[in-house]
Image (cartoon, rainbow, N blue to C red):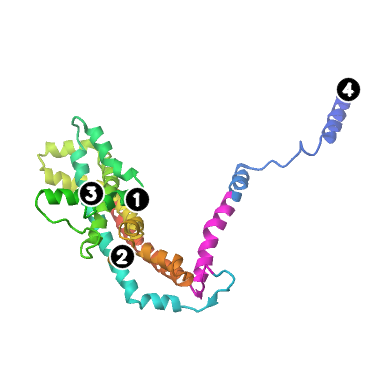
Amino acid sequence: MADVAQSQALGQQTTAEMQPAAVRSWNPSDRAMAWLFTLPTMLLLIFIGVFPLIWSLYLSFTKFSANAPNVAPRWVGTDNYARIMTSTDIWAVFVTTAKYVVVAVGIEFVLGFGIALMLNRSFPGRGIITTLMLLPMMLSPALAASFWKLLYEPQWGPFAYYFKVVGLQPVEWLANQKISLYSLALVDIWQWTPFMLLISLAGLSAVPRYLYEAAEVDQASGWFKFANITFPLVWPLLLIALIFRTMDAIRVFEYPYIMTADAQATQTIATTLYRMAFRQWDTGLSTALAYIVLVMIIAMTNIYVRYLTKATAK
């Protein structure tokens, strides 16, 4: 019996030695497999996202034109940044963009939250009304700009027609430099108030009902419930919506480009960047302006995030 057992052991050892190397291959851990699968994608994203940032940052310190690729970039140091910071035209563009952002985002915030308060209750047709109010947000900004440009037409547009019906003179909504910027802001308000409405509704629906029931037991007024329950609990979500809408409004391009053909009164940061980069072909100066805007957006976002952190902590 001992000889039989010894023969079986020798046979198993011989079989193990005869197994191919593929069977005794490397057996990686779960962490190693995760890195193995994600590393190619991470390298691709770094190449696509990080490399252009580094290259454009270098170009912002040079004199370079993208339509003359055979001419090497010429180092000029901080001259591009100095030209931008001392240019009255650029500062006028910053002021115009700031006016647009404050008017558009401010009104969207008030309207979106106010409508959400009215829709945050049960009544017949609530779902249909909410769905219809969200429709403008589904359109592309270019399509919305083209649509409103037709509405604003001073000769045969719908607004001009109804003004004539009531005996008023048609308004040059887009040609009048005093109101053209606010006419664009109205389009932004029409299209993106539903976004604020959607976020506000999500926040209001997450407020626990028992808080209102406890306040009603104490006979609290409607204003007390709004100021001490509703608004404090919804405020963090509203701040997130404000962050997204502010960043989006700062880089508005379609409305001024399509509706006013980038007229001086409605020139924004995005249209100025486009003009510098793809009309004047001043790549170095345009990338410098882009990085200045990037720093401004990061600083503004940090302010929002600080308030968001404080609101969440409370």
Q: Earlier in the sequence, mark 4 or mark 1?
A: 4
Amino acid on which the number 1 mark rests in the picture: Pro
Q: Nearer the viewer, residue 251 or 181?
A: 181
Front disc: 2 or 4: 2
Tell me residue 64's x, y (percent): 52, 73
Identified by mark 4, the residue type is Val
Tell me the residue that label 1 is attached to.
141
Look at the numbered disc 2 and give the secondary structure of its residue. loop
Q: Looking at the image, is 155 positioned above or below residue 274? A: above
Q: Which residue is mark 4?
A: 4
Whole-number angstrom distance, CA of label 3 to CA of label 1? 32 Å
Residue 246, picture quadrant: bottom left
Q: Residue at x 23, y 47 (%)?
A: 112
The image shows residue 76 at horizontal and vertical percentages of 50, 79
Q: 300 or 163: which is nearer to us? A: 163
- Amino acid carrying label 3: it is Pro
Nearest-to-viewer mark from 3 and 2: 2
The kind of residue on which mark 2 rests is Ala
Residue shown at 17% from the left, 36% from the top: 213
Please give the residue where the numbered disc 2 appears in the rendered image: 263
First-in-chain label (2 vs 4): 4
Tell me the residue at 37%/76% (across/down): 85
Part of the protein shown in magenta: 41-67
Q: Which mark is residue 232?
A: 3
Q: Is residue 83 left or right of residue 50?
A: left
N-terminal label among 2 and 1? 1
The answer to the question of whether label 2 and label 1 lie on touching residues, with beta carbons closer than 8 A, is: no
Q: CA distance from mark 4 to mark 1?
A: 84 Å
The tag earlier along the polypeptide, 3 or 4, is 4
Residue 168, quarter of the rendered image: bottom left
The answer to if 54 sits in the magenta stretch is yes
For numbered disc 1, what is the local secondary structure? helix
